[in-house]
Image (spheres, rainbow, N blue to C red):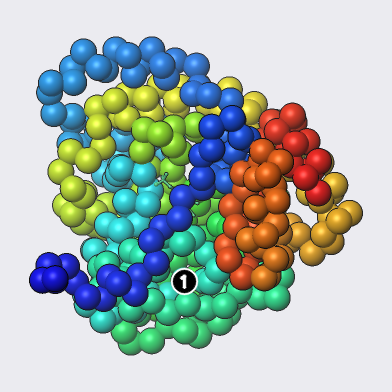
Amino acid sequence: MTRLTRPDLDALPAYVAGRTVPGAIKLASNEVPYGPLPGVVEAVTASISGAHRYPDPGATALRTALSERLGVDADRIATGCGSVALTEHLFRVTCLPGDEAVYAWRSFEAYPIIAATTAATSVRVPNTATHAHDLRAMAAAITDRTRLVIVCNPNNPTGTACRRAELDAFLDAVPPTVMVALDEAYREFVTDPDVPDGLEVYGDRPNVVVLRTLSKAWGLAGLRIGYLVGSPEVAAAVRKVVTPFSTSATAQAAAVAALRASDEMQRRVDLITAERERVVEAVRKVYPDVPDTQSNFFWLPLGDAAVDFAAKCEESGVIVRAFAGDGVRVTISSPGENDAFLDCL
Ligand SMILES: *Cc1c(COP(=O)(O)O)cnc(C)c1O
């Protein structure tokens, strides 16, 4: 057969999404279980009457709302079709073919796929024995070819978080010519006061960008919207490479409505983080090495038993996310759904 696509793609693993099985409890994709925030359905419905028009490519209303919430100028914000898309855009604005991107491993499985498809070279730095980023080793892995370092804080899928002192030292060690992306998809679930808000604490460093999403705490995973905050130059570069019109008018309207419901978002997040304490304590009675988590999920370091464990849970109607040979990630949900998982143990 004639080959029409790049041969190197054959070696690239496909992104494995958390599975949705009708009738089963899904604890596989770190979603929040309570439905869209108040006002979102109305905003989406209203936006549909304009569906024959292109969306605002500058996402003006949304960037204004984000600018007010975050206390940063709108010219420092870029929005995208999920923060995964923004991560890809960041690779495109930093890395030429062969340039290096440093990230921890295991971390978010989108990174190696994005690196490979944008022709960047992945430099994976193994996590510590307690499943956290090894920031010293990450700083030491930076070479003349490094253009981008990603810190996933808290880390997906292990839930671990980097604290203030180690992040300060790390950022001081990174050359100013290397961009550092703080992927804070789960920022809203952080309760440890020692885990810094990347935007508040490091946002003024010119080589730092912060990635956030409306998919998790804000409950809009299905509408695909995320944002990035960086220097005005970096944000402008990202806005240049965004696929034109890739954030739909509906997603923009939904995000603006969701941001207005921040009290309810916080209430839901508080329910999840309270459940997190309860569930992790119960799980540790069986699996004591569950690492501390600052996210809406936790990590079971089961090694070779991971796939079997997930299959057993599925037989009991609970879908969790296995990473073959490594571990299982379980999303914290409502008390009833969490109890269904605990029953699987
Ligand atoms: C979920 C997640 C994202 C955001 O995904 P989008 O739905 O594309 O916004 C980004 N980074 C990490 C680590 C995630 O787990």
Numbered disc 1: secondary structure = strand
Residue at x 38%, y 76% (from the top left corner): 122
Q: Is residue 52 left or right of residue 250?
A: left
Residue at x 53%, y 71% (from the top left corner): 105
Q: Position of residue 40 (x, y in %)?
A: 42, 19
Please name the amino acid that badge 1 sits on. Tyr
Q: Which residue is mark 1?
A: 103
Q: Is residue 323 left or right of residue 215?
A: right
Residue in front for this viewpoint, 236 or 146: 146
Q: Quadrant of residue 258?
A: top left
Residue at x 66%, y 75% (from the top left corner): 128
Q: Position of residue 146 (x, y in %)?
A: 35, 80
Q: Is residue 88 above or below residue 165?
A: above
Is residue 23 visible to us here?
yes
Residue at x 32%, y 14% (from the top left corner): 45
Q: Position of residue 259 (x, y in %)?
A: 45, 27
